[in-house]
Image: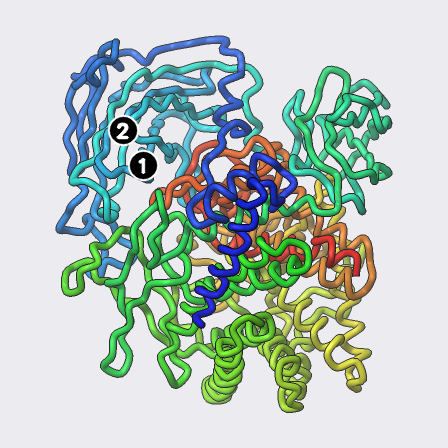
Amino acid sequence: MNTILSSSIGLLFVLCSGKAMGQTAKLTADGKLNDAIWNTGILHRPLPLDTTGSLENLGWKKKVLLRHQPKGITDFVNWRQEGVGTISLARKLGEPGSGQVKLQVPTARKDWAPGAPADGDYANYGGASAVFEVGGENWEKYNRVIFRIYPDCEGGRNLHLNLHYYNDGKQKIPDEYFREGTHEINLVNRTWNTCFLEIGDLPRDRITRIAFGVPGFGKDRVTGDSLNFYIDGIELQQVENPERMLGWEPAAGRIIYSSTGYDRLGEKTALLKRSEQGNASFQIVRVSDNQVVYAGKKKKVHTSIGEFDVLDFSDLTTAGQYKIRVTDLESLPFTVGDNIWQNSVWRVLNFIFCERCGHPVSEKHGSCHADIGASFEGLRLAYNGGWHDAGDLSQQSLQTGDVVFSLLEMANKVKNDNQALYLRLMEEAEWGIDFILKTRLGKGYRASSAGIVIWTDGLIGNKDDMKARVHDSPFDNFLFAAYEAYAAMSITQDPALSEKLKKTAMEDFDFAVAKWREKGYDHFPIFWEHSYATSESQFMATASWAASQLYKLTGQDRYAQHAADFMDEVLLAQRKEPLGDADGLKGFFYRDKTQKVVVHANHQSREQVYAQALVALAEGQPHHPNQSRWQQALHAYGDYLLQMMKYTAPYGMVPAGVYRIDEAQDSLSFQRQHLFAGKKAKEDYVDQLKQGVKLDEAYYLKRFPVWFSFRGNAAIHLSQGKAAALLGKYLKNDKLLQIGREQLYWTVGKNPFGQSLIYGEGANFAQQYCPLPGEMVGEMPVGIQTRYNEDVPYWPQANNATYKEVWMTTAGKWLSLTAEYQPEELNR
């Protein structure tokens, strides 16, 4: 039986059982979420958006101190049209007021945008805008702009407009990597959307114009021939308590805490802006009866990033729902317990489902991209399946593989605890597995990626039939072999599929070894793919981990030998001698055994592979002669992670790590790591390092990565958290386990901005950049960024790529890390 069908039948049985019990079967402890999941047929259509706890909803509660309408905003003569659309003065029928501007944009286009590549790779059809000429007003006394938008779009499922904002004063944007002043507004069709954007971080001393625009993304199956937007009610405001957008210090009057909650075990802390009240008390209040269950004193903490008040309630280990109370401040409710991440798993799984490619997703899109093709030896493959990459619709096979692995990890951890969640995770993983197998073209070649940022028409033979890339990368085949072997061991309900995956894993491993022996490690031909920056030591660690997976699957000694041999190369790249800093940092990895350039991640990250490979070897070959070397490497890497944590304390985000001052001089590795780095990149590299912590004459520590065009660190710190969790379990080190937890806490609110980065999870979650799939429960962004060359967190409300773009990689990293903190796993 087809494995996806078998999982669906299993789910149908669970669904019917739940219905027979009056929908009382518990999929999650949250009753409202439980009902929502049942009503989607257990995530076979998207979860409904609940904006109650969103930043946009909470923002309307702020007190308005000043109001101002831009001069001439209601006079149509001050508006003009740019691009392919038209604008007119056309009041929405039945609506009061005047000055409504209508923007009409055709959806069907014949030509790519000017300057786009002829093959359509990462190209759209060009945009249209309604532009208001402001005339140079100074808006510095205002920190918020509000506006009303009414979309009237036939077949409009996922609608948005971009607000563009232009300043020509003394405040300049000082580098080329930012899109400040661009904000995507996600909209609901055929209703007035009243929206706002806080602008306190943006240059605004001489505003010349603002524009409302939409790119040409083509037509989904139900989309009409034009998009129509009515724009009205534009006003500037000064509001009380604007959001914190830059820096480590919390906003005044804001408790910084994990808005999902805290694991019952481990440390539990929250933060406040430093006050002068000394050791004022705080309380933990039980939500059910409003009783104080814990009382403590605030601790004044001074670290390398500033002064804070820290609230420590680690001694509270009774499961329940609580609030933090400090004088006249009170947090929203959060959970303490043994299974606090399960709700987030359901929500993130919803996001993954909504990103399916080639499959109709109710309320989102029809079956898509069957006309994207890969060619190999005279044959053509329809390159659709798996999941879209991000807020655009691009595809990367290896990224689908990453997500498959994370789904299977989580499924294996909840198998005995939540059958419905297990079956749904397996069903989604099997959707991705089908794509992994489908894209194998023979002889080690794969269809690997496609740059898609439009809805294509599905007809083969016209202009929008973009080509998928094809290559035979040994790194890809090693990593796929690991994922396929793990999948073969995880799938029990479809023995035929498990057998096929075992055979495929062995073949792909052999293809990888053969290509590596022929070409060496450095065979990464595709500039656009997220594997492009892979170092030699990461390559060897991945090969070792893949071999260990195959050894576990087959028991064949040749894989055990490969795993040990590849690790020999990895250990040559590990720093053994302490640096000249006070802590004597060591244990990190260089790109290769010359130890000239340290391994970093600045966008995609698979840094956890060192821990995965070492733990797999230590557990899989306990009597190997190199066991002591592996143990030393594990301890050294764990110590490195532990020693770094003081540089972001009292937050728990793992710093990006150690950098060498002269790394930019190695042009080849620098270009591999930093795409579209710009003309000043080498100069900026040094400047960014000097914003960090000087360790000795050659080395610096960065809290956030050195980066240029691609910014956002969620995948990076979640990968490091995964490494810490794996090491913590193997070494039985609670401090390392706590590092892993802290990456989760940071993500759902224990960050300087007090925002959850998972839409619908916890509190104060904001809209994200998702122009084509539309807003989705459980979506996660690329992550918090920095501004210019600074080394402090920056998180404006302005909603654009890459930092706020929804990204499947982040979702996979989240599932993979939360899998380490499932009750069954922690109680082993």
Most foreground residue, 572 or 635: 635
Q: Give the quarter of the image for residue 446.
A: bottom left
State the quadrant of the C terminus: bottom right
Q: Secondary structure at mark 2?
A: strand
Please name the residue that numbered disc 1 is placed on: 159
Q: Is residue 409 above or below residue 569?
A: above
Q: Is residue 313 above or below residue 743?
A: above
> Label 1 to label 2, Cα distance in Å?
8 Å
Across and down, in percent, residue 716 comes to: 58, 54
Across and down, in percent, residue 443 comes to: 39, 85
Q: Is residue 724 above or below residue 57?
A: below
Most foreground residue, 613 or 633: 613
Left or right of 484? Residue 154 is left
State the quadrant of the N terminus: bottom left
Across and down, in percent, residue 19 comes to: 53, 45
- Asked if the residue under mark 2 is in contact with the one under mark 1, i.e. CB atoms within 8 Å, the reply is yes
Q: Residue at x 16, y 59 (%)?
A: 463
Q: Give the quarter of the image for residue 106.
A: top left
Determine which of the numbered discs, if any, sits on residue 151 in the image. Answer: 2
- Residue type pointed to by label 1: Leu
Q: Residue at x 28, y 72 (%)?
A: 381
Q: Is residue 149 above or below residue 549?
A: above
- Residue type pointed to by label 2: Pro
Q: Secondary structure at mark 1?
A: strand
Q: Earlier in the sequence, mark 1 or mark 2?
A: 2
Q: Residue at x 51, y 51 (%)?
A: 707
